Image (cartoon, rainbow, N blue to C red):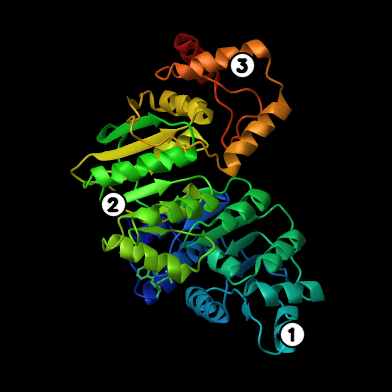
Amino acid sequence: MKTFQDFDLPKSLQKAIDTLGLTTPTPIQEKALPVILSGRDMMGIAQTGTGKTFAYLIPILKQWKFQTTDSPRVVILVPTRELVVQVQEELEKLVQFMSVRVAGVFGGVNINTQRKAVAEGVDILVGTPGRTMDLALDGVLRFDALQKLVIDEFDEILNLGFRFQITSILTMMKDKKQNILFSATMTEEVDEILDEYFDFPEEVSLAPSGTPLEKIEQFVYHVPNFLTKVNLLKDLLVRNDNMERILVFVNNKKLVDTTFDLLDEDFAGQFGVIHSNKSQNYRLNTMASFQRGELRGLITTDIMARGLDISDITHVINLQFSEVPEQYIHRIGRTGRADKEGTAISMVSPQEEEILIEAELLMEKELKAMDLPDYIEISEKKLDFEKDRRKFKTIGKPIKREEKGDAFHEKKDKNKKVNLGGPGKRTPRKTAPRNRAVEAKRAAKRKKGK
Ligand code: AMP
């Protein structure tokens, strides 16, 4: 096991750590340290109590060099006044043998005292987003010497409605700085801001690494549309008592709600949702009842599930296939227990066939195709997102008569994996473009399927 001695910290910092009686880094500290020291942007998923504060303070202080600037080189944004005080206290303990000027700023108190403290010169500023923004707009707080920005408890900052303040502060800061972000959970709003303001921060999390693929049984049903998928899921839930701890994935939070409503009709009280619109407390309570076995399943999206320590899953159900193939592997890695196999069941509509093939190529493994039982009611109704897709496709590229015919025959041939797509069929990929080898393999496979 690593100790703090292994990190080769400067004497003054090591002495402070010794004085605090700390010997071994916590897991998040061990993981975050090398990433922060490398200078890359980082997104850490860690809850309070994991040692996350020292996980960013220690590497920042390890690299500390004396410089004569009066505006802060490090800004740490946290959601509440209490947390400003707490982080400031921890920071002061760590710098007790160094010469680093620390200041904490937060709302609800007279701004003039804080204005004066900032004007006198600060090296590391800890603040709430509102007061930090006010001081910056005021001109007294400048970001010209800024090297590192830390946003701690990012999800909570957004839950408290500080989005505007955060984005304003980001706009006032120069781009060339290291961004270190921490969040207890990954919400859609956090993800959105990450996308807009940060370049691919390295993700550091404590979530257990996934179950190896060999231990997961993977099935696929080819199903015409979403509501039919729900009918099939309901049937599986009735027939299989061993579906005890289920994670149901869809691709957006609106469908999380829709799915919840539909399942709740027949399985009242058995499912919960992990929802970015709900408070942190609600999410933690839902998680806790799931862990205690009071809920049979959770309905979620990739973003909402990220960072959640959900274990012991018997079945992962993909009511919608993931939008990128890597995500599929992440999802199914959630199933499986220490000594047992896990089961992943995907329900794939014609529009999702191509991405299924991509995932199979990535894993070099095919999903086992299951026949849709003929008593499952085929819904004629399409949900809005299914209608939109078609409209978009037609506008994007008119389908010629012959092509339509081909597609129809291919569609009828249920067991073949076919590519029915044209341009504009899928949402843009978030990952790097496929490499040539995969591209070629994919083409070969498609050809074989025809
Ligand atoms: P945090 O998750 O940052 O709120 O930290 C939770 C508590 O753990 C704080 O009281 C820290 O002082 C303490 N702590 C942080 N790192 C360590 C460590 N490596 N060993 C023991 N305690 C620690």
- Residue closest to the far left: 339
- Spatial CA distance of label 3 from label 1 is 72 Å
Q: Can residue 385 be seen in this view?
A: yes
Quadrant in which ligand 1 is drawn:
bottom left
The image's mark for residue 404 is: 3
Residue 377: x and y in percent read: 40, 37
Where is mark 1, residue-wise?
Answer: 116
Residue 137 as seen in the image, left or right of residue 4:
right
Residue 355: x and y in percent read: 50, 29
Callout 3: CB less than 8 Å from ligand 1: no
Mark nearer the viewer, 1 or 2: 2
Cβ atoms under marks 2 and 3 closer than 8 Å: no
Disc on the earlier residue, 1 or 2:
1
Residue 285: x and y in percent read: 38, 68
Residue 414: x and y in percent read: 42, 20
Q: Image point 51% across, 49% down: which residue?
A: 255
Quadrant in which the N terminus appears:
bottom left
Residue 167's place in the image compared with 410, above or below, is below
Disc 2 is placed on an element classified as loop
Disc on the earlier residue, 2 or 3:
2
Residue 408 as seen in the image, left or right of residue 210:
right
The image's mark for residue 245 is: 2
Q: Image point 40% across, 67% down: which residue?
A: 284
- Spatial CA distance of label 2 from label 3 is 42 Å
Q: Is residue 306 visible?
A: no
Q: Image point 68% across, 69% down: which residue?
A: 72
Amino acid residing under circle 1? Lys
